[in-house]
Image (spheres, helix red, strand yellow):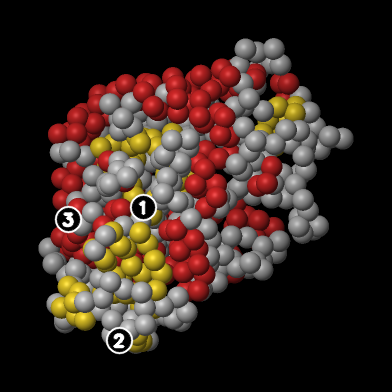
Amino acid sequence: QTNARWWKEVCVYQVYPRSYKDSNGDGVGVISSLDYIKSLGVDVIWMSPVYPTPNEDNGYDISDYRGINPEFGTMEDFDLLLSEAHKRDLKIVMDLVVNHTSDQHPWFIEARKSKDNPYRDYYIWRDGKEGKEPNNWQSFFGGTVWEKNDATDDYYLHLFAKGQPDLNWENPRVRDEVKDIVHFWAGKGVDGFRLDVINCISKVEGLPDAPIKNPTDKYHWAGEHFFNGPKFMEYMSQIRKEAFDRYDVFTVGETPSVTPDHGATFTHIDTGVVHMLFQFEFVALDTDPNGSHRFDSIKPQLRDIKGVTTKWQTELGRDGWNSLYLENHDQPRSVSRYGCVETEELRVISAKMLAAWYLFQKGTPYIYQGQELGMTNCHFKDIGECRDIETLNYYREMMDKGETAERAMKGIRVKSRDNARTPMQWNTEANAGFCREGVRPWIDVNKNFREINVEAAVGDENSVFHFYKKILQLRRQHKVVVYGEYELLAGEHAQAYVYTRTAGDEQIVVLANFERENCSVDLSGEKLLGGEGELLIANYNDVDEKRQMTQTFQLRAYEVQV
Ligand code: ISL
């Protein structure tokens, strides 16, 4: 197989440590769950940040790159986790957040003291303009990207929260620090890195004002001045050569605002800078183009889902590589978003459909904790139930604009990152088994934990969990799932998504109904190898084991047949 690599053949499970299994400070949270994770059939665990942090953005604000958050445990606990994972043939991937640090990081504490401090150039400083911010850029979390620093009478840049000052990658010392951090963790034996918003590290020179879209807004979105910036490839090639390439580690870049062209360049097997990346075009499909915030949503159109998915499946070329995800700690739950949670039966059926639909595509798949149970969005009634900085800022902005609380909560229920961050549902005990009775978790458990939890799912062979497990087995058995070519069939069909994966004389056909209404799909005129097909997996129990492929298929509500 050309370009065969181990990191193309694995499946990654993402753990959000704050919400996975409470450790009571003894560090056994994730360790005690390794057997469960292994039983799902994944190969790699990516942990969202576990470093010391003031938690302004739940660990994506790091105050020490070489330590462990005391809430989770100690470095000894981490070493134990790593060795226990390796014993089970599970790899560990760290989250590397180096576009910014916490404002509590010693570098920043130093840097803000004076203009001649040796750490000053680790960050991005500008003078104010006529008593106002240096430019009109808007932060990811709302408001300005600039914060005044009294000691030096100027401003520092933060694309995210004000507690997340951006590092100045122009400074070669900053790049050396990043390499050292990679050496530290790779030297310990970790197996890979997920690079947080890595395509924001190179800002356009001069930091020009953002274009004004809506003149009544105070600040404006400046993505074009910091995404995929002029020196991104140069900086990252250097880190790749001098750090990553010295180990057998894999890298995945989190890259909002990229096209398949960027994808092909960034992930090129020889000249690229990461092995794969997370694109955002798919998860953006339910954002209302006429809305004023990403919380304004529409139903994603199957036509667009086909277009975006097919583009990414086909345009990275022979030398690029995809990652596949439906969920992570920033996204609402996929079954609530793309499936149907109106009845318990449909929740299970549609969660399975989505699983098969994405896990047979080309790329390295990621499963977010609880996704394998079909966990759902949380029906937040009141802003008091929410914790995320982006959500809280949004709510405040809406109140300032004179909107009603109900209008704000409507968006939050659909899109808040807190939907993904409620505790993992282990069993029917207090706090869903996430933490001891009597301890209030940092965010409340979803009320449906008595029906949706690990114990119930593992004990029920028809559960979403067992369906995921079976697909992961099929991925191992059939290399065509990893390396086969993707092709969209019946492209104009209004509610069925049909595609093939082909390698030589082996072909997989996936038929998925994205709607509640039944439909039929005629494959007789489609480009297929033909002949008799054998059923690999389906989400209804009474499907024929053998089928002539070039004929009409009937699909029920959210049915999937592979
Ligand atoms: O969450 C988002 C909506 O999809 C994005 O705007 C998100 O903030 C962006 O994708 C960057 O995400 C990453 O970096 C952030 C952190 O808050 C996220 O949790 C992380 O995944 C800053 O470090």
Amino acid at circle 3: Gln
Crowding at label 2, few (<14), some or many (≥20) Cα neighbours within 10 Å? few
Front residue of 481 and 358: 481
Residue at 14% x, 67% y is 460
Give whichever of discs 1 and 2 has the lower sequence position.
1
Against 118, residue 513 (above or below) is below
Give whichever of discs 2 and 3 has the lower sequence position.
3
Instruction: From the image, tell me which residue sits under label 2.
Output: 552
Q: Is mark 3 within 8 Å of ligand 1?
A: no
Instruction: From the image, tell me which residue sits under label 3.
Output: 477
Tell whether 144 sits left or right of 167: right
User: Horizontal and vertical percent for residue 284?
Assistant: 53, 61
Q: Is residue 496 visible to the viewer in this orientation of the structure?
A: yes
Amino acid at circle 1: Gly
Give whichever of discs 3 and 1 has the lower sequence position.
1
Q: Is residue 31 visible to the viewer in this orientation of the structure?
A: no
Tell whether 253 sits left or right of 174: left
Residue at 20% x, 36% y is 85
Q: Are marks 2 and 3 in contact (CB under 8 Å)?
A: no
Instruction: From the image, tell me which residue sits under label 1.
Output: 363
Element marked by disc 1: loop
Crowding at label 3, few (<14), some or many (≥20) Cα neighbours within 10 Å? few
Element marked by disc 2: strand
